[in-house]
């Protein structure tokens, strides 16, 4: 969703912000802009389109000043347009704001401000924030003008909804930031070296420190690995000296953390796309996740009366794998919930353990479900990939899946790392150990299927309807495979537990419809899969068989021969050819796999 960057320091702000915005592109957006403050004035450049297009039109780096804010906008209120793009200014042009999230009560505030004579230029909810700050500046204590911080503090106190703001004011050498529900991190930059021999040479005009703010850690990795994470209700002022945090009006200290991710990890390193880089990285990320310590979470789970496992999209599919494994391995029942449905449907109370799965650790639906569960006395185990993420900070036990930065919008390596950690957790609850000897070799064998999957994607390049089927642990794998294809190849793909076909969808299997059958021989149900495959073939379906059983492979028009694997580890291997199929199908259709239309990496609005 929207991405925010803020900078103040000794460098020129615009090129610095421009670079950081490019590193945030993966969040998904439709317009971009930068504002800087210089010589007591604010200048804004913004437009609809990708950063490179906006830059081509407006030269985003050509703005004077050492303080600024930047934004990538994912439209919610108001279509993608130049007028709705951020940064947005007040009536005087002396304030500029960037915003992520939704101000739910913006209409009521807008009417009030219109009555006071404010002129609005955009259709956004955001614009009320900047006018309200402008209004608040006029009314400080006594007859005085309010300070910049005071005006922002007073404004955010009026807002309902989820937001992160960065605000810039002409003539003030600082940025004011506020957070409620949408992520914002503060980055500590490199001070100038006294000798002038450090990374940046000293000059009288711009000596000192530098500070950053951003929606996400990867945006700032080329400048810093030292962060402090804002909490909901925090207001932060950054200037060249550092950051001052306050929480609900009171000064507070927030821990500074060093992250292990490097800028290099978030680069393509010779691959044409992040998506294929991240698919290939599974050779290392899966074994690493299988080594993660899950002891504390397993203990909490053993003591829990009820287990709920929640997530969205791909993370939800990992939850489904877990539910199945926990039942089979530990004989324990877990309810799996799509996080956005949880509040309305789940019965939760003390004695419930919620396992919240989210690679970003910022997904609003998951965060709100967790908040609801905590309010009803539940304990929470968070499974995330991002150190310091909101979900990780608010949990009783926290498991980092350690997949490294995932820049491609669609989840690939984080899915398998989630599944690996959850598999370990299910085994730990059952008091069993995982046998992983030789598993890396199997991952390598499956990654080597890339040319085959490319060939299949080519032969299906004009096909727009797909079915994915599987039983048991292969059913969520089928769902994840179909989701990948929908997300980046923009084709219609449905996934069913294979036994469900004859309860309805079989009517859609006609001549030439591809049916992707996920059928590891280790599953107890693979004989039944044979029957389901035959049903489809009898109606003209073209089978793509993924299996290590020669009998099942024989049924396929396309045969994807898999290495033999234990049932519990099968989802980790069987998803890889499906990720490759989606990647090559996307390329066949001329799309960009890293930035699928309408989608965002971190979904921070409900
Ligand atoms: C799919 C995908 C999304 C996310 C979902 C949850 O490729 O990326 O479906 O899985 O938005 O995101 P997280 O895991 O960050 O909570």
Image: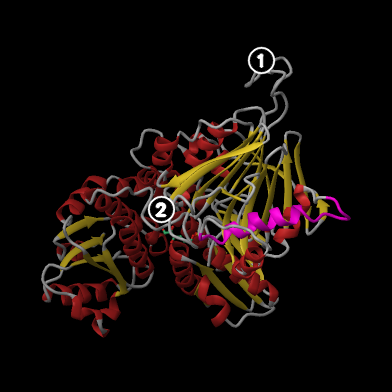
Q: Which residue is mark 2?
A: 412
Q: Residue furthest right?
A: 142
Name which residue lies at 23% across and 66% down: 466
**Would you say residue 31 sits in the magenta stretch?**
no
Q: Secondary structure at mark 1?
A: loop
Q: In the visual, does 53 lie left or right of 148?
A: left
Residue 137, x across and y down, in percent:
75, 52
Is the shortest distance between ligand 1 and the CB of mark 2 under 8 Å?
Answer: yes
Number of on-image labels: 2
Q: Which residue is mark 1?
A: 197
Q: Nearer the viewer, residue 269 or 517?
A: 269
| Magenta residues, start to end | 123-144
Mark 2 and mark 1: span between their CA atoms?
42 Å
Q: Earlier in the sequence, mark 2 or mark 1?
A: 1
| Local crowd size for mark 2, using a 10 Å CA cut-off: few (<14), some (14–19), many (≥20) | many
Q: Secondary structure at mark 2?
A: loop
Residue 45, x across and y down, in percent:
51, 40
Is the shortest distance between ligand 1 and the CB of mark 1 under 8 Å?
Answer: no
């Amino acid at each position: 969703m929207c991405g925010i960057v803020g900078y103040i320091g000794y460098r020129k702000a615009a090129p610095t912000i421009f670079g950081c915005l490019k590193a945030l592109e993966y969040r998904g957006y439709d317009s971009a802009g930068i504002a800087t403050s210089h010589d007591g004035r604010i200048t804004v450049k913004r437009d609809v389109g990708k950063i490179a297009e906006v830059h081509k039109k407006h030269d985003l780096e050509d703005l004077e000043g050492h303080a600024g804010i930047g934004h990538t906008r994912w439209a919610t209120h108001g279509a993608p347009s130049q007028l709705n793009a951020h940064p947005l200014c007040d009536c005087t042009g002396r304030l500029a704001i960037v915003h992520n999230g939704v101000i739910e009560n913006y209409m009521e505030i807008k009417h009030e401000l219109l009555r006071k004579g404010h002129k609005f230029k955009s259709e956004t909810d955001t614009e009320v924030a900047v006018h309200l700050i402008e209004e608040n500046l006029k009314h400080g204590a006594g007859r005085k003008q309010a300070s910049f911080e005071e005006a922002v503090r007073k404004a955010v106190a009026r807002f309902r909804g989820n937001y992160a703001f960065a605000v810039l004011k002409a003539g003030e050498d600082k940025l004011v930031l506020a957070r409620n529900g949408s992520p914002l991190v503060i980055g500590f930059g490199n001070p100038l070296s006294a000798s002038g021999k450090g990374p940046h040479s000293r000059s009288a005009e711009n000596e000192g420190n530098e500070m950053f703010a951003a929606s996400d850690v990867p945006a700032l990795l080329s400048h810093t690995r030292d962060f402090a994470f804002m909490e909901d209700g925090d207001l932060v002022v950054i200037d060249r000296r550092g950051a001052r945090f306050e929480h609900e009006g009171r000064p507070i200290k927030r821990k500074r953390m060093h992250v292990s991710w490097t800028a290099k990890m978030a680069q393509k390193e010779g691959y044409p796309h992040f998506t294929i880089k991240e698919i290939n990285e599974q050779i290392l990320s899966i074994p690493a996740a299988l080594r993660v310590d899950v002891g504390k979470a397993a203990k909490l789970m053993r003591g829990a009366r009820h287990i709920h496992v929640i997530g969205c999209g791909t993370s939800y599919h990992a939850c489904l794998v877990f539910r199945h494994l926990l039942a089979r391995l530990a004989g324990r029942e877990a309810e799996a919930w799509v996080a956005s449905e949880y509040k309305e449907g789940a019965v939760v109370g003390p004695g419930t353990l919620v396992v919240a799965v989210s690679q970003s650790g910022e997904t609003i639906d998951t965060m709100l479900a967790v908040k609801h569960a905590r309010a009803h006395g539940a304990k929470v185990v968070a499974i995330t990939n991002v150190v310091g993420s909101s979900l990780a900070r608010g949990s009783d036990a926290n498991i980092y899946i350690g997949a490294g930065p995932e820049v491609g919008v669609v989840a690939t390596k984080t899915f398998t790392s989630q599944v690996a950690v959850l598999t370990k957790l299910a085994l730990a609850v059952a008091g069993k150990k995982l046998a992983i000897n030789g598993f890396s070799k199997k991952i390598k064998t499956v990654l080597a299927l890339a040319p085959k999957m490319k060939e299949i994607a080519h032969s299906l390049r004009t096909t727009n309807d797909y079915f994915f089927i599987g039983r048991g642990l292969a059913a969520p794998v089928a769902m994840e495979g179909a989701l990948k294809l929908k997300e980046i190849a923009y084709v219609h793909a449905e996934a069913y537990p294979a036994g469900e076909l004859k309860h309805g969808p079989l009517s859609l299997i006609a001549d030439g419809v591809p049916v992707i059958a996920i059928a590891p021989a280790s599953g107890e149900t693979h004989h039944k899969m044979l029957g389901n495959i035959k049903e489809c073939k009898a109606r003209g379906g073209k089978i793509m068989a993924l299996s290590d059983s020669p009998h099942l492979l024989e049924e396929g028009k396309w045969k994807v021969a898999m290495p033999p694997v234990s049932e519990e580890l099968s989802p980790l291997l069987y998803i890889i050819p499906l990720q490759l199929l989606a990647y090559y199908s996307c390329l066949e259709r001329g799309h960009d796999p890293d930035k699928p239309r309408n989608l965002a990496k971190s979904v921070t609005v409900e």
